[in-house]
C-alpha cells in the first residue's frame, strides 16, 4: 500500500502544467454544462486543444483525432446553444425514442469496430479497441449535448468509466482521476437537469 501511494505521488508530481491546465478547464466545462452555461464551450475548446498535443505524444492517435474534433464541436456547440437547436433550456427539449438510440448504437458499434481494425492493421497505435470505441461514442455523446439531450449523460457514465482505466494505464494519472471526478459531476449534471425539468413540469401543471 505504501509503494502504491508513493507511486501515485510521484506520478502526480511529474504531471505537467499543461495536463493540470487541461484538467482544470475540463472540470470547468462539465460544471458549466451542468448549469447550461454557454461558457462551457470555451472551456472545452481550450482544454481539448491542450489534450490534442498530449494525446499525440502518447501515441493515442484516435484520442488525438477526438480532441481535434472536440475543438470543432465546441464551436458547433456554442453556436447551437446560442442560435440553434440548443438555445432552448434542456427541460424544454423533447427526448429521442429508445428505437432511435438503438439504431444509432448499432451504427456506432460497426463504425468503432471498423476504425479499431484499421488502426490495428495500419498503425502503431496502442489500446486500439478501447481508444476507438471511446472516441466514436464520445463524439456521439458530445453531439447529443450540443442538442441538450438529457440522454447524453447516460452515455457519459459508461464512457467516463472506461476512460478512467484507459488514461491511468497510459500514465496520465491526473487525467484518469479527472474522469473519476467526471463520473461524480455527470451525476450532478443529471440532477441539475432533472431538477429543472421537474420545476418546468410543475410550473406547466400549475399554469
Image (cartoon, rainbow, N blue to C red):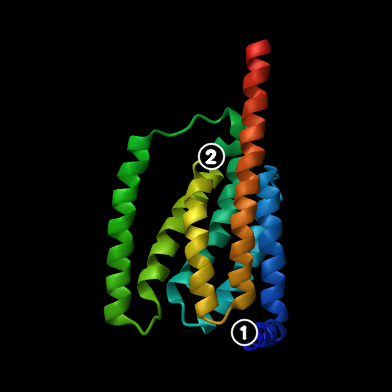
Can the viewer see residue 207? no
Residue 104 position, x and y percent, is 34, 46
Marks 2 and 1: which is nearer the front?
1
Res 52 → quadrant:
bottom right
Position of the N terminus, as image quadrant, is bottom right
Q: Residue at x 39, y 33 (%)?
A: 97
Which residue in the protein does label 1 denote?
4
Q: Secondary structure at mark 2?
A: loop
Labelled disc at residue 150? 2
Q: Position of residue 99 (x, y in %)?
A: 32, 36
Horizontal relation, residue 100 to residue 58: left or right: left
At 63% from the left edge and 13% from the top edge, which residue is drawn? 205
Q: Vertical placement of 61 versus 102: above or below? A: below
Q: Position of residue 94 (x, y in %)?
A: 50, 29
Crowd band around label 2 with a 10 angstrom C-alpha radius: few (<14), some (14–19), many (20+): many
The residue closer to the viewer here, 47 or 155, is 155
Residue under the image location 50 percent in, 71 percent down: 165
Q: Nearer the viewer, residue 186 or 75?
A: 186
Above or below for 25 versus 192: below
Question: Which quarter of the rendering shows the C terminus?
Answer: top right
Residue 16 falls in which quadrant of the image?
bottom right
Amino acid at each position: 500500500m505504501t509503494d502504491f501511494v508513493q507511486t501515485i505521488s510521484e506520478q502526480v508530481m511529474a504531471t505537467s502544467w499543461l495536463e493540470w491546465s487541461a484538467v482544470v478547464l475540463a472540470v470547468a466545462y462539465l460544471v458549466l454544462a451542468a448549469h447550461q452555461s454557454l461558457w462551457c464551450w470555451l472551456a472545452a475548446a481550450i482544454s481539448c486543444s491542450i489534450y490534442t498535443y498530449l494525446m499525440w505524444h502518447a501515441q493515442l492517435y484516435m484520442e488525438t483525432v477526438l480532441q481535434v474534433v472536440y475543438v470543432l464541436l465546441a464551436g458547433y456547440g456554442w453556436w447551437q446553444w446560442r442560435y440553434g437547436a440548443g438555445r432552448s433550456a434542456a427541460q424544454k427539449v423533447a427526448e429521442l425514442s429508445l428505437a432511435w438510440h438503438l439504431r444509432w448504437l448499432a451504427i456506432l458499434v460497426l463504425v468503432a469496430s471498423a476504425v479499431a481494425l484499421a488502426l490495428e492493421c495500419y498503425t502503431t497505435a496502442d489500446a486500439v479497441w478501447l481508444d476507438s470505441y471511446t472516441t466514436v461514442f464520445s463524439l456521439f455523446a458530445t453531439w447529443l449535448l450540443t442538442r441538450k439531450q438529457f440522454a447524453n449523460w447516460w452515455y457519459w457514465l459508461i464512457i467516463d468509466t472506461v476512460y478512467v482505466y484507459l488514461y491511468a494505464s497510459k500514465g496520465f494519472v491526473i487525467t484518469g482521476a479527472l474522469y473519476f471526478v467526471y463520473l461524480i459531476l455527470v451525476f450532478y449534471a443529471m440532477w441539475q437537469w432533472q431538477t429543472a425539468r421537474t420545476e418546468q413540469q410543475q410550473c406547466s401543471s400549475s399554469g
